[in-house]
Amino acid sequence: MRALFALLSGGLFGAGLFVSGMTDTRKVQGWLDLFGDWDPTLAFVLGGAILPMAIAWRLTEGRRPALGGVFPPKPELRIDPSLVGGSALFGIGWGLAGLCPGPAMASLSYGGVGGVVFLAAMVVGMLLAVPLRARLAAMPRPA
Amino acid sequence: MIEPDWIFGALGGLMIGAAAALYLLANGRIMGASGILGGLVDGSARADWRERGAFILGLVAAPAALFGLTGGQAATHLTPNLLIVAAAGLLVGAGTRIANGCTSGHGVCGISRLSVRGIVATVVYLIAGGATVLVFRHMLGVI
């Protein structure tokens, strides 16, 4: 049952990425290109996506997930080097190619050799992150 | 003037948000593409591999079906420079796992919950992505 709903959610996510045009790297790089031919489409996508999700977060209050378990607790308010440094690395890669993890998977069937190379490199990057994360976590935290 | 791309963007965005809402309300999980794949890749989430695998199956299969149904016109327009593609993939994979989230997890799921960590991550990767396009497109002319 959990797998079925995950399949449905993944399918809807993929279809949404396809319809929104977010698997087209030109549109993503166009959004990031403030000093060139700026493309505002991504703002409509993000705005459209936040709306149902904001309602969903409201619905979680005082309830439990339909398939059991508990809802993820709100993360503690901690802005650490991992969050900022990791997001900066991600942003550089996102700008270079115009792909982030969701669209990279969603476009696998029509992304050609480049799409496969990106996905393979992304998987390697995810494996490299394991020791990096451990090292960052061991760093002394500012009081 | 409203462009058709913006309407498709908002429509696709609503679908992405609905997918995230379904994953949250049914399975009790945050729909984050990098986390769902990353947990499978580094073995940190072996217990729920079925759920994650099913999500990724849907995420790849639905756009593949839509690509066929719409006459195979979608394209990622990814740069043919595979060195840049590989570097970008590495950065996206490592960065999202170090930051514990990407555009879907920190962006869609985090902002809709008014999570400070999600908002900070989003601001950082937007700035890093914008700076990267500025440098690599307008100064170096390589993307």
Image (cartoon, coloured by chain):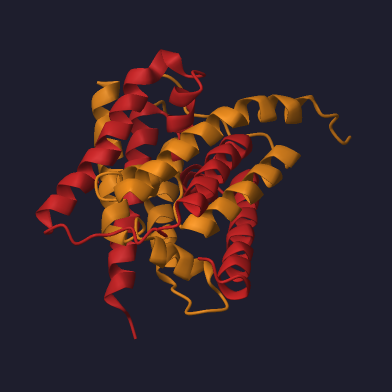
Chain colours: A orange, B red
Q: Residue furthest top?
A: B47
Does A30 sit left or right of B69 as displayed?
A: right
**B100 lies above or below B123:** above
Horizontal and vertical percent position of residue B104: 46, 46
Asked where in the image residue B100 lies, by quadrant, the reply is top right
Residue drawn 44% across the image and 35% down it: A60
Horizontal and vertical percent position of residue A63: 42, 29
**A58 lies above or below A22:** above
> Can the viewer see residue A98?
yes
Q: Residue furthest bottom?
A: B1
**A64 lies above or below B126:** above
Residue drawn 58% across the image and 48% down it: A90
Residue drawn 48% across the image and 39% down it: A121
Does A37 sit left or right of A108 as displayed?
A: right
Horizontal and vertical percent position of residue A91: 58, 53
Asked where in the image residue A128 lies, by quadrant, the reply is top right
> Can the viewer see residue B31?
no
